[in-house]
Structure formats: structure tokens, C-alpha cells
Image (cartoon, rainbow, N blue to C red):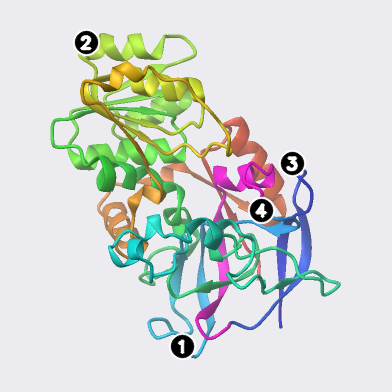
Amino acid sequence: MKQAYAAISREKSKPLVLECIGIDEPRADEILVRIVASGVCHTDMVVRDQGYEVPLPLVLGHEGSGIVEAVGRDVKGLVQGDHVALSYSYCGKCDKCEAGTPYYCVDFYERNFKGSRMDGTCPLHDSHGIQISGCFFEQSSFATYAIATERNAVKIPKDVPLELIGPLGCGLQTGAGAVLNCLKPKKGSSIAIFGAGAVGLAAAMAAKIAGCSTIIVVDLNAERLELAIELGATHTVNAREQDSVKAIKAILPNGVDFSLECTSSPKVFRQAIDCLGIPGTCGLVGSSPLGTEASIDIGSFLFGRTLVGVVEGQSIPADFIPELIEHWKAGRFPFDKLVHFYELDKINEAMADSESGKVIKPILRMKH
């Protein structure tokens, strides 16, 4: 059994607790990863607050990056010493996975949010030897070590800084992928992006890569809107000072070709629909707690408008994470401008700073 240091969510909405844990040896299809860093994502806070009811106590974290330390006997594509970015989990065998859409895997929720392996076991134990929930996105990377699988581990070049690339496994691939893989705007298209967090700003950078001629970013934070311009937005709207829909239609009277809702707010969701032109497509990526409802004007969809939910940017991580790394190397996807580093024992500060808007993308660094 491997000893590790982990941040554990023991009570709903309470600060995470730093404890020593034990991790079982990897099974035949699993790998043991020495975690170098892990991004903090909005979904981690949603689950901490039990917006998705994953059993507690639980080790969260699903934007891990690190070095493979051990592999199970059935693992063929990875070896000890490989550098990897960890992403979401999928079965690889269902009709959705075989069709090349693993983000629609029939077991997606169970494999990422069950808190255990599919057979109900978990490789994590507290200091008393009691099993605790883990396998969060089949990684639980708020720890110095994690058990993952070959499916959700993406090998990356060793010249890429490991401490930086973890967020490519979820938040950044969600925003960028929503644009490049799902909406697929043609050159010269227009898009409005609601929310200038990590997901929204990744989407703005992707919209520039796609050749959108009008990229409007909407947020309440003036500093983030300034950064949005630096990253490729052509216009910004401060929703604290203006009516978002009116402001967008002052720029484009006929509305935008595409919109992307990244805030999880029902009110903003309605605005993302109302700013569309005809036909127009709205992508929904905000991670709202289950049961969240919003009102829409049904009649507004009669003229060809489309609403599409986007999971993990409709990305195949093994393909898309290397693509984003190449964009970063070429200066087209400077996501390093979004990050702020914390040590693992500052995780509650990192979460608070993320929720307050003080930082855009916290990354936790692990001491070994």
C-alpha cells in the first residue's frame, strides 16, 4: 500500500481536511501516478457542496498531472516514468464510446461521480484503514498520489511543464472544445461568451483560433474583461453596468451566430439564448447542481435556434489535449496567463479565491 497526503472532503460545504491516506497497488488495468499538480475546478466545489451527491468522505480533484510510477499488468500504452495529464473516465466499450464519443459514455456519471470503481471498491483508505470515497473522475488528484487508468491518462511530451497542464484535462478542454469541437464556428462568425472564468476565457481563445470575427465576452469583473481582450475578445460587456442582451445587440443588431453559457446561472442562461440571431446556436457548459431549472421562451426556438449541452468540450482527451498543447506552444492558447499556484495545504484558500473571483484557475502543487 502506498502512503499519500490528501485533501479530504468530510462534511458538506466544509473546508477540506489534510490527512495521510493509504492507496492500494494498481489493479491490472490501472496506473499509479505521482501527482505533480492538480487544477481546482468549479465542479470540485459543486461536489464539495453536494450539488452532485458523491459519498463523503471523499478525495476530490480531477485535473491532475504527474508521472507514472507503476502500471498494472494489462496496461500497454504507458510505462513507468511517462508524464501524463489526467482527464475524465469512460468505459471504451459501449456504443457511444465505440462511435468515437466517449464523453457520452453510458457509464459516464458512474465512472466519474460514483466515488468508487464500478464494482463498488475504492483504492483509498484513511489512517484507520477505513475505505473512503475516491475514483473521482477515476483519479481523485487532490493527493500526492492517485490511481488512474490508461483510458483517462494522456501521455505528454517531457518538455511540457507538468505543473501547468493539469487543467487541460477538464476546465480548459471544456471551454476550448465547446467552441472547436461542438459549435465549430466558421471563419467570420460571431460568438458571445458568458463568463470570463477559465472555461469562458479558454472558449474566447478558441474562438480566435477558429477565426471568429466578433468575440464578445460578458462578465461582472472588469479585470477579467481586460484580460479577455488580451486573449482575443473583440468586445466585452460588463454585466454589472449594462443589460447584456441589449449591449450585445448594440454591437450586432441581428444577434450573434453562437453563444456559450459558462456561469451555471439560470438568469444568464436565458440571456445567452436571447442574444442569439436566427437561427443561432447556444452551447451550455455551466455545471449547475442537479435540479436547477431555468425559464426560456419556447417560441424563440421555432426559427431554427439550437440549444446544445456540452460535456468535457466534446473532447477525446488523447487527441485534444496534445492539440491544445501545440496551440499553447505556438502562442495561440496562452492559458498560462490564467493560472495561480498554491501548495496543497492551501487548498481551501485556493477554493475560496476561485469562488470569490480573486483568481481564475488555481493549480495545487504537491510536495514530495
Foreground residue, 20 or 147? 147
Foreground residue, 157 or 98? 98
Q: How far apart in space, not on screen, are marks 1 and 2 (Cα)?
A: 58 Å
Describe the element under mark 3 as helix, strand or loop.
loop
Q: How far apart in space, not on screen, are marks 1 and 3 (Cα)?
A: 39 Å
The reply to whether residue 219 is in sight is: no
Quadrant occupied by the N terminus: bottom right
Amino acid carrying label 1: it is Asp
On residue 13, which mark appears? 3
Amino acid carrying label 4: it is Val
Q: How far apart in space, not on screen, are marks 3 and 2 (Cα)?
A: 43 Å
Q: Which residue is mark 1?
A: 74
Mark 3 or mark 4: which comes first in sequence?
A: 3
Q: Which residue is mark 4?
A: 54
Region of the chain picked out in magenta, as a range:
27-53
Which circle, 4 or 1, is nearer the viewer? Answer: 4
